[in-house]
Amino acid sequence: MKPKPFRMLAAIPLLIGALTAIPSCQPAGGDRAGGPTAKAAVQKLLAGHQGKVLLLLLGREDCPGTAKATAVLDAYVPRKPADVDVVRLDVPLPGETLKVGGWTHPFPRELDADRAVADGLEFFYYPTVYVFDRGGELRFAGGYDAERLETMAKEIGAEQPGQPKKSYTLPLPPIGSPAPPLAARTLTGQDATLATLRGGRATMLVFSRTSCPFSMQALPAVKSMADTHRSKGIAVVLINQGEDQGQIRPVYEKQAPGVPVVWDATGEICKAYGVDTVPFFFLLNKDGAIAQRRSFTPPAATGALNALLGIAAEAPRYKTSKAG
């Protein structure tokens, strides 16, 4: 898929379907992407790295995921090519005055105090890594896998003028298409396929990580949905992104008892579904086709399910101005 230049950023695959996120990840208010202030802020940032491949990490100090992503970049910077720049941009929640502490890492950190860059990028999830090529085109937006980021930077840096450009963002399966097949095991050792997991009327797959605080915040709602709808032919399933089984089993047993948890040991399920950030859900109809997919919030998941079952219109995009 040919990447779009920045002026068409709102169309990048990561944001298809106006995805919404857990409240503390959700931008609200301010100058949204497409506004002159937001566009100018991003262009100003990119101008400072003209002719370079830019790895831009958007996050914040109190986010465990940001700490992990920063560690990945710490390890990469000493061996990165000279034509690759690395920057961390700390982003406050809407209406928040974010204070930052000391900085001891081998790459610069900046503060997006008014969220202009974040809004220009339609940032919605802590942390997100953005990779721009030497011409300022966005080539990737998503997670912080070390090997993948290093490979991207190397390949983009080696591109020649006129060469077709590759987009590295994982594509989301289209709404209406059959859900990608999966074959794995649950944390209780049972075989897990779409056939064994599927509900008679609908199936909700919720991608999760125990290391993500927003996934943990979502678990009570996931359990409640599973308990409420199980007798109605609706299956709710958690899919964990390959964390250590011994560590995550007691967490899910305590926080979401009775909800099956599929262990995506190699990450192949997440890759097939285009999932880079969690919590994220796919809602499948009775035939196994994708009815909806977006970041998980209780209103979004409940609204999508009600819309599928013809109970009510889907809930509007969920917004908040505070964490939690």
Image (cartoon, rainbow, N blue to C red):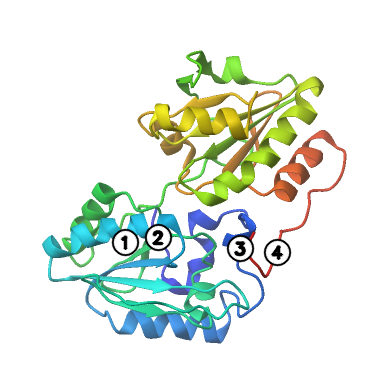
Q: Which residue is mark 4?
A: 319
Residue closer to the observer: 251 or 150: 251
In this rendering, the label closer to the viewer, 3 or 1? 1
Q: CA distance from mark 2 to mark 3?
A: 16 Å
Ranked by sequence position, the earlier of labels 4 and 1 is 1
Give the residue type that dot 1 points to: Thr
- Element under disc 1: helix
In this rendering, the label closer to the viewer, 4 or 2? 2
Q: Which residue is mark 1?
A: 70
| Left or right of residue 140: residue 148 | left
- Of the numbered discs in the image, which one, if any, rests on residue 26? 3
Give the residue type that dot 4 points to: Lys
Please tell me how crowded label 3 is: few (under 14), some (14-19), or many (20+) other residues with Cα within 10 Å: many
- Element under disc 3: loop
| Left or right of residue 308: residue 169 | left
Please tell me how crowded label 4 is: few (under 14), some (14-19), or many (20+) other residues with Cα within 10 Å: some
